[in-house]
Image (spheres, rainbow, N blue to C red):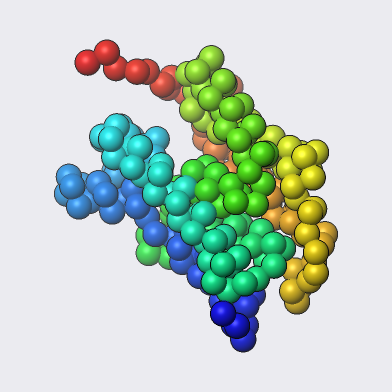
Amino acid sequence: MSVEHPIAVSLTSAYLLGSIPFGYLLVRIIYGSDVRQSGSGNIGATNVSRTSPVLGVVTLLLDASKGMAAVALVLLWIHGTRQLAFAAAFAAICGHMFPVWLGFRGGKGVATGLGSFLLLTPKAVLIAVAIFVVLAAAFRWIALGSVVASAALPPLAWTLSEAHQTSGTTGMINRSQPLLWITFAAVLIVLKHHGNIRRMLSGAEPRFRISSK
């Protein structure tokens, strides 16, 4: 499909896809409550799982899927370049973090970031997921795994040559930018965890527990 303004259409579509607050909607529809009024007040999978572990998993999958859909839209429907797809991935993450529908107060972007970059830097994402699993299992802090895995993604993508295997240009999107979009996303995700980081440093961060019930 030929799009007259591929950058504007791609970034706007990606933001709107990313801004769909699945966690908020699922809890509201099924339980009639506002997930922002419980736990950490976040709309992401971890906080949703405190209301319902099953809904937490569903939220995780849906949040990852909307990021993946944003990138797939650029690559398959708009036929944009990979450079533009990296920018769309970042826009989707921003949509999740700052959804217009919820007063720009959203989630922390981990699951959406996973889905957004999975089609673009699959090897780096899979290694980052492994880092997350190991750290979360070892320390039982979801936030620790999220922060370290997110911070590791840019150097992994660069080392594995997944952030600069691009060609051509589309307007302002040039060859130097794919790694920057990943880095911007990682920085935002880490900053969104500032409260968790403070609590981990003080030992006040709740540890993840698997119920035996």
Residue 178, located in which quarter of the rendered image? bottom right
Q: Position of residue 59 (x, y in %)?
A: 36, 44
The residue nearer to you, when weighing 69 against 32, is 69
The residue nearer to you, when weighing 163 against 187, is 163
73, above or below 97, in the image: below
Q: Quadrant of the C terminus?
A: top left
48, above or below 94, in the image: above
Q: Position of residue 29 (x, y in %)?
A: 20, 52
| Residue at 51% from the left image edge and 54% from the top image edge | 67
Q: Quadrant of the N terminus?
A: bottom right
| Residue at 45% from the left image edge and 63% from the top image edge | 17
Q: Is residue 109 visible?
A: no
| Residue at 52% from the left image edge and 30% from the top image edge | 143
Q: Residue furthest bottom?
A: 4
Residue 172, located in which quarter of the rendered image? bottom right
Q: Position of residue 142 (x, y in %)?
A: 49, 28
The total number of labels drawn is: 0
Q: Is residue 129 visible?
A: yes
Q: Is residue 93 left or right of residue 151?
A: left
| Residue at 56% from the left image edge and 20% from the top image edge | 134
Q: Is residue 175 left or right of residue 138?
A: right
Q: Position of residue 37 (x, y in %)?
A: 29, 43
Q: Is residue 19 left or right of residue 188?
A: left
Q: Is residue 36 left or right of residue 175?
A: left
115, above or below 147, in the image: below
82, above or below 152, in the image: below
